[in-house]
Image (cartoon, rainbow, N blue to C red):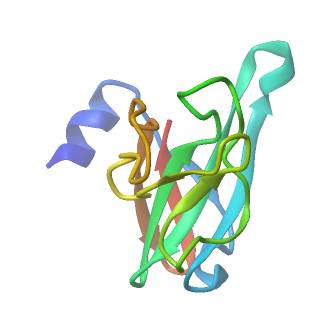
């Protein structure tokens, strides 16, 4: 039902082909459009406990960037600027006092991912 409402509002998901191949406990940076020109978005796509989650690449603390690669303890996305760790499902920081990272809705379909930016 939510999908129908989003479609009616013109909010269509961005497609990430082959996202189903992202290994468990791993994060991958995905770029949509041209973020440098202000017309795009960078997200970190993470697989935790078999489910894909997406976070904004920008750390809410001091403008650092959450990085791709192995997740800390196989389940936390990390900003290397101060070693802040974020829970990919909720965006909540687990080891510091900081705002939550922005999350995006993700749906896995036939080996691809749909992300609502």
Taking the view exactly as shown, the residue that stands out farthest to the left is 1
Q: Is residue 74 left or right of residue 29?
A: left
Q: Find the residue positioned furthest to the top.
A: 38
Find residue 70 and report its image quarter: bottom right
Residue lying at 50% horizontally and 65% vertically, measured from the top left: 76
79 or 25: nearer the viewer: 79
Query: As displayed, is residue 99 above or below residue 109?
Result: above
Is 85 located above or below residue 38 in the figure?
A: below
**Residue 89 x/y as whole percent:** 35, 58
* Residue 62 coordinates in the image, percent (x, y): 64, 23
Q: Nearer the viewer, residue 79 or 104?
A: 79
Residue 106: which quarter of the image? Answer: bottom left
Query: Left or right of 23: which side holds 107?
Result: left
The spot of residue 64 in percent (x, y) is: 71, 33
Which is more toward the observer, 50 or 115?
50
Judge whether 10 appears above or below 105 on screen. above
Residue at 46 percent of width and 38 percent of height: 101
Mark count? 0
Q: Which residue is at a point 28% across and 30% down the rendered structure image?
A: 8
Q: Residue at x 40, y 62 (%)?
A: 107
Tell me residue 50's x, y (percent): 42, 84
Q: Is residue 22 left or right of residue 47?
A: right
């Amino acid at each position: 039902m939510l999908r129908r409402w989003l479609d009616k509002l013109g909010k269509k998901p961005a497609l990430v082909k082959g996202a189903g191949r992202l290994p468990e406990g791993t994060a991958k940076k995905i770029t949509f459009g041209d973020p440098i020109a202000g017309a795009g978005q960078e997200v970190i796509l993470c697989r935790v406990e078999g489910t894909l989650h997406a976070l904004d690449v920008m750390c809410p603390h001091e403008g650092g960037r959450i990085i791709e690669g192995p997740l800390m303890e196989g389940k936390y996305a990390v900003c290397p600027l101060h070693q802040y760790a974020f829970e990919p499902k909720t965006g909540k920081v687990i080891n510091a006092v900081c705002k939550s990272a922005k999350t995006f809705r993700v749906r896995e379909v036939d080996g691809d991912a749909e992300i609502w930016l």
